Image: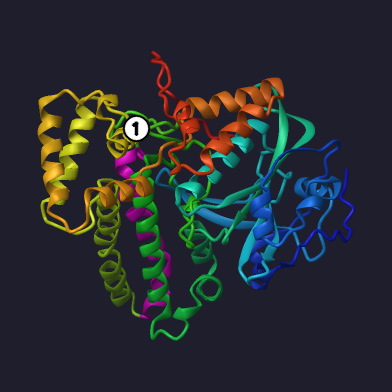
Amino acid sequence: MTNTKRTVYTGWNLKNSYERLPEAFFSNTEPTAVSSPELVVFNKSLAESLGLDTEKLEGDEGVDVFVGNVVPEGASPIAQAYAGHQFGHFTMLGDGRALLLGEQVTPSGERFDIQLKGSGRTPYSRRGDGRATLGPMLREYIISEAMHALGVPTNRSLAVVKTGESVIRETDLPGAIVTRVAASHLRIGTFEYARGIGVEELQALADYAIERHYPELKAEENRYLAFYREVLKRQAALIAKWQLVGFIHGVMNTDNMTISGETIDYGPCAFMDEYDPKTVFSSIDVQGRYAYQNQPPIGKWNLARFAETLLPLFHEDQEEAVNIAQEAISDYDSYYHKHWLRGMRDKLGIFDELSQDEPLIEDLLGIMQKHKADYTNTFRAMTLNHLEETPMSESTEFTNWYKQWQARLDRQEESKEESYQLMRKSNPAVIPRNHRVEEALEAAVSQEDYSVMERLIDILADPYAYSPEQKEYAKLPELSDRPYQTFCGT
C-alpha cells in the first residue's frame, strides 16, 4: 500500500531545515501506509502548545497523519543517518523505523521535530521491518510524559495509534506508531557519522546545530569549542536530574545522547525502587555498563567521543586540538557534581551551602542502601514527616542521622516550614512504578482496556501534588523472586 500525499489543515506549520544539510545525512523516505488505524492515546495539551487543531487531530484526519497514511502540507519525510558507540563498540546506524516529518514552528516561534516511530522500513532498516509494537510505544508515551512532569528534559509523545496490522516478533503482536516531539534528534552519534564523512560535512552539521540550538554562540571566537562546552553542561545537568529521581536510562549509547540535552530512547529504561547504586534493569546490559551508579561517568565517556569528532574544528593543529578538548571535558565532573549536590540539598530542604552537606547526604544514602529502603518513598516519607513508613526508621544510625539533619536545618535562615515546602517541590510523591506501568500495558495490549493506562497517566501528570489519589500509586510491588527486567522494545 502506498501513501496518498495531500494537504491536511490541522494547524501544521512544518519546516524542513535539516534538508539543507548534505544529502549524506538523510534519505527521503515515505512512510508505509496501514490499513485500519485507531487512535489509542492523544496528548491534547501538548498538541495545543504546538499550535495544532486538537479537534481535527482526534478525528480521522489526525489519525491518518499519525500513522503516515497522509503527509501534512509542508512535511518532507526523511530518515536520518547517524552512527554510535553501542555498549562501547562503534557501528553505523540510522533511523531504521522512524521518519522525521518536519519541524513544527509553534505560534511562539519555537521549533520542534515531529517524528513517527514505527512507520515502516527505511534505507537504514537493515533486516528490520521498520515497525513497532503497541506495548513499547505506549511505554514510551507513559515514561516520556512522566519525565516531563518530573521536570526532566525529554522528548515527548503526541499520540499513539494502532496500525490495525500485526507485527511478528516471538509472536504476533499489535502494531503501533508513536508520534514523538523533540527539540531535535541531533545526537552525538550524528557527529560521529559526520566525522566519518569529512571535515566539510562535520562543519556543516556543527554550524546547523549551533544555529538551531545555540545561536548566541555564533559570535564566539571559537564557536565550536563554545558549542561543545554548552552541550557538556546540558548533559551534566540532565544526568544529575536522572540520578535525583532514580531514573535508569538503560542504553546510554552515543546515538541516544542528544546535543540539545534532552532524554531520548525509552526502551529498557526504568525507575529504581530499592536504593542500590548497582541497579540494572536492561536484559542486555549483563555487565552493568549502564547501571545507576555508572550513568555519570558514562555521560563523560560519551562526551569524550563527542570531543573527538570536533577536534578538526577546535584547532587546525591536532595536538593543540586534543589539549583544548581535554581541558574542556575536565570540567564535566564539577558541572555534574554541582547540579547533583544542589538537587540533593533541595531534596533535604537545605537552602544554603555548607561543607558538611555532602557527608550528610552520603550517610543517608548509605543507610538507605543498608536497609534496602525505597529511593522515592524515603524522601516522600521525610517530606511528609512520616518516618515510620521507612524500613530504617527505628535503626539507631538513622535516628542519629535524623538529629544531624534537623540540626542542619536549624542553622539556616529559612524556617522548617520553608524547608518542607522546598522538599515538596523537589521530591515526587509518585514515579512511574515499574509494576504499575506493566499493569497498564498488560491491560491495554492483552485486553484492549486503556482505562488503567489513562488513570496512570493522570496520576503521573503532577507528581509533586501529594494528592490523596497518589498514595495508592506510591505503594511498592509485592516481593518477587524474579528481578524486574526491561527489554529493548521493537
Residue 255, image x, y percentages: 50, 52
Q: Nearer the viewer, residue 336 or 20?
A: 336
- Apparent side of residue 340 relative to residue 132 in the rendered image (left or right): left
Dominant SS type (magenta): helix
Which residue is located at x 76 percent, y 48 percent?
Answer: 66
Between 480 and 397, the residue placed more toward the observer is 397
The residue sitting at 30% across, 64% down in the picture is 329
> Is residue 490 among the parts visible in the rendering?
no
* Residue 188, position as x, y percentages in the image: 47, 59
Q: Residue furthest top?
A: 481
Q: Quarter-wise, where is residue 78 in the image? A: bottom right
User: Mark 1: which amino acid?
Assistant: Asn
Q: Mark 1 highlights which residue?
A: 377
Horizontally, is 159 left or right of 335 in the view?
A: right
Instruction: Looking at the picture, tell me which residue is in the foreground, 272 or 342.
Output: 342
What is the span of residues highlighted in magenta in the rendered image? 289-316
Taking the image as shown, residue 490 lies to the left or right of residue 151, namely right
Say what secondary structure mark 1 lies in.
helix
Question: Could you classify mark 1 by the number of other residues whose Cα lies within 10 Å: few (under 14), some (14-19), or many (20 or more)?
Answer: many
Name the colouring of the figure.
rainbow
Quadrant position of the C terminus in the picture: top right
Number of numbered discs overlaid on the protein picture: 1
Toward which corner of the image does residue 355 lie, by quadrant? bottom left
Q: Is residue 417 magenta?
A: no
Q: Residue at x 80, y 51 (%)?
A: 55
Query: Is there any visible trace of residue 363 in the rendered image?
Result: yes
Residue 372: x and y in percent read: 26, 25
